[in-house]
Amino acid sequence: KFANAIIQDVSNKKVSIIEENTNFLIIKVNNGDNLSILAQRYYNDRSKYKIIYEANKDKINSKYEIYPGSKLLIPKI
């Protein structure tokens, strides 16, 4: 699922993958992204946004706001 979501999004030019390894991706946030959208994109489940938040809470404020151009860690689950 994870790899298929990445392939689809890359082909649609929705994703800016900066780095990938066996445990995580580092992506660049695009306009219109939020944690729920990223959770849907990478985990096919909007409710898993807290996984992304927990991996990046040093970069995300308490309102879960993210900004275009920011780099986020997306754990592989």
Image (cartoon, helix red, strand yellow):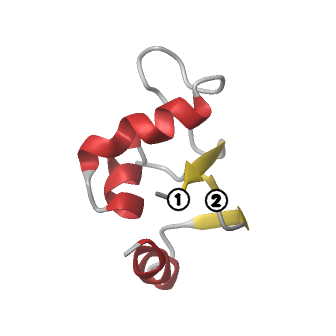
Identify whether 65 is placed above or below 5.
Answer: above
Residue 77, position as x, y percentages in the image: 46, 57
Q: Residue 76's mark?
A: 1
Rendering quarter of residue 48: top left
Identify whether 30 is placed above or below 56.
Answer: below
Q: How busy is the neighbourhood of tag 2: few (under 14 within 10 Å), some, or many (20 plus)?
A: few
Q: Are marks 1 and 2 in contact (CB under 8 Å)?
A: yes
Residue 2, position as x, y percentages in the image: 44, 71
Callout 2, which amino acid? Answer: Asn
User: Reading the chain from its start, which is encountered first: label 1 or label 2?
Assistant: 2
Residue 25 versus residue 15: which sits nearer the camera?
25
Label 1: element kind: loop
Question: Which residue occupies 48% across, 78% down?
Answer: 3
Question: Which residue occupies 53% across, 59% down?
Answer: 76
State the residue position of label 2.
23
Question: Which residue occupies 70% across, 67% down?
Answer: 20
Label 2: element kind: loop
The quarter in which the N terminus is drawn is bottom left
Q: Residue 16's mark?
A: none
Rendering quarter of residue 51: top left
Callout 1, which amino acid? Answer: Lys
Report the Cα–Cα distance between label 1 and label 2.
Answer: 5 Å
Q: How busy is the neighbourhood of tag 1: few (under 14 within 10 Å), some, or many (20 plus)?
A: some
Is 69 left or right of 15, judged from the image as shown? right
